[in-house]
Image: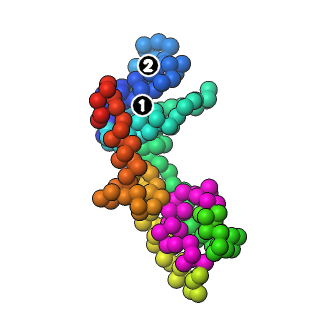
Amino acid sequence: MATIETVKKIFAMVFFKFPSRRPRTHEEGEIALKAWCKIYNRVPDDVLMQAAERFYAETTKLYPDDDPFAMINRIANPIFTETEGDAVELAFEAASKFGRYKEVEAMSWIRGKSKLVAAAVQRLGFLELCDSAQPDVVRGQLRAIFAAEKSRAIETGTVCDSATQLDDGINKKLLDFVAGFKIGGKSE
């Protein structure tokens, strides 16, 4: 559960990077702090800090209507709306549209539609999808792989593009990012 100390750190990070987002009065800041403590209440501290760190590292500008705290909340609580049916539809559409000789283009097209579906197709193998004489079997395999990938993405908050990114079951890119983040000159 998110503590007030963690939420205060997140506020400090946001206001340091985007000073124009600082509340106009102390009272406004206190009201916002209490509200976001309630909103973030169900998110574990470590997950919330990782989301804030990703936001801090990846966000270069905010538009007037952007809410940085809502953006952090979406990173901490990702919503993957894709279904198993979507995965099957996109995979077979790519196979039909690009064929087996344009695997790179097909995977890029799928990734542009859904990183989650692309991860599932990567696990199955695009060429296996194209070459299969039993499309119903491939559909079933793709559904199972997609369900597992979606479950992992919801749990970790990120899509693991390839199993080569894993280090003891954890996405290595995410580990490298968190390990490299420094606060006050010290690695966390």
Sequence order check, earlier mark of 2 and 1: 2
Q: Amino acid at mark 2?
A: Gly
> Bounds of the magenta span?
108-130
**For the view shown, which residue lies furthest in the front direction?**
101
Q: Amino acid at mark 1?
A: Trp
The residue depicted at 50 percent of the width and 62 percent of the height is 119
SS category of the residue bearing label 2? helix
Q: Nearer the viewer, residue 32 or 90?
A: 90
The residue depicted at 33 percent of the width and 41 percent of the height is 179
SS category of the residue bearing label 1? helix
Residue 132, given in percent of the width and then of the height, sits at 57, 83
What residue is disc 2 on? 29
Q: Quadrant of the C terminus?
A: top left
Residue 172, given in percent of the width and then of the height, sits at 37, 52
The residue depicted at 64 percent of the width and 60 percent of the height is 109
- Using a 10 Å C-alpha cutoff, classify the residue at mark 2 as few (fewer than 14 neighbours), some (14 to 19) or many (20 or more): some
**Tag of residue 36:** 1
Q: Quadrant of residue 62?
A: top right
- Using a 10 Å C-alpha cutoff, classify the residue at mark 1 as few (fewer than 14 neighbours), some (14 to 19) or many (20 or more): some
Please state if 78 lies on the left or on the right of 111 as rendered: left
Whether the magenta-drawn stretch holds residue 117 is answered as: yes
Q: Nearer the viewer, residue 40 or 88?
A: 88
Residue 169, given in percent of the width and then of the height, sits at 33, 59
Can residue 142 be seen here? The reply is yes
**For the view shown, which residue lies furthest in the right direction?**
97
